[in-house]
Amino acid sequence: MTLQVDIPTLETERLILRAPQIGDGDLFAEFVKTERSRFVGGPNDDKRASSRAWGHLTGLWVLRGYSSLVWCLKDGTVIGHGGPWYPATWPEPEFGWCIWSDEFEGQGYATEAITALHDWTFDTLGLNTCVAYINPENTPSIRLAERIGGKIDRSACQPFDDEVVCIYRFEPGAA
C-alpha cells in the first residue's frame, strides 16, 4: 500500500518551495550543527537527533496535511525551510522559518517565501490564524514577522515550559 500525500510546489520570483526529500535531511543536519540553529534547538551534532527532528517536520504532512516546505533557489540550491506546521504539543499552528546558511541571509528570501506561504496557508489550507514563536534575541525573525504583518499577541499561550518567547499572530490578508 502506498500512502499518497498531496504536498504542493509553490513558486515565487526567485524560489521554489517544494516537498522535503530524503537528501534534504543531510543538509538539515549540517544546518543543525551550526550556531545558526540556536533558536531552533541547536547547535547539535547528534545525527540521530537531527534525523528525528527532520522526520517530525516532514511527518506532519501525513498527520496534519501541512508542514514546512524546503526552499530552493531556481537552480535547485537548497537554502532553508519553513511554512505552517503544528507539532502535537503546541497550542496552535505556527509559521516557522530558517535560512540554513549565512550565504543566503539578508537577501529577502525568507520574506519572499513566507509571504507566499502566508497566502497559501490562509487561502488554500483555510486556517484562520497562525502564530510565530520567536526567541526575543532573534531580531532578524522578529523583523520578518513584523514585515509580513505579524502582531504581538500577549494573550497567546506560551508553547514551551523552559523558554518564554515572543508570539506574533498572523491572520488572512495581513502579509
Image (cartoon, rainbow, N blue to C red):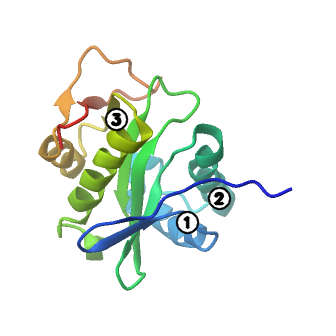
Q: Position of residue 171 (x, y in %)?
A: 25, 31
- Image vertical order of residue 6 relative to residue 166, above or below: below
Q: Which residue is mark 2?
A: 51
Considering depth in this image, is 161 or 52 the residue closer to the camera?
52
Horizontal side of 62 relative to 107 (left or right) equals right
- Please state the total of marks drawn on the protein image: 3
User: Residue 108, located in which quarter of the rendered image?
Assistant: bottom left
Quote the CA–CA distance across marks 1 and 3: 22 Å
Q: Which residue is mark 1?
A: 29
Quote the CA–CA distance across marks 1 and 2: 7 Å
Horizontal side of 85 relative to 72 (left or right) equals right
Q: Position of residue 60 (x, y in %)?
A: 59, 44
Q: Secondary structure at mark 1?
A: helix
Q: Earlier in the sequence, mark 2 or mark 3?
A: 2
Amino acid carrying mark 1 in the image: Ala
Horizontal side of 30 relative to 3 (left or right) equals left
Q: Residue at x 38, y 61 (%)?
A: 35
Q: Which residue is mark 3?
A: 133
Quote the CA–CA distance across marks 2 and 3: 22 Å
Q: Residue at x 54, y 35 (%)?
A: 87
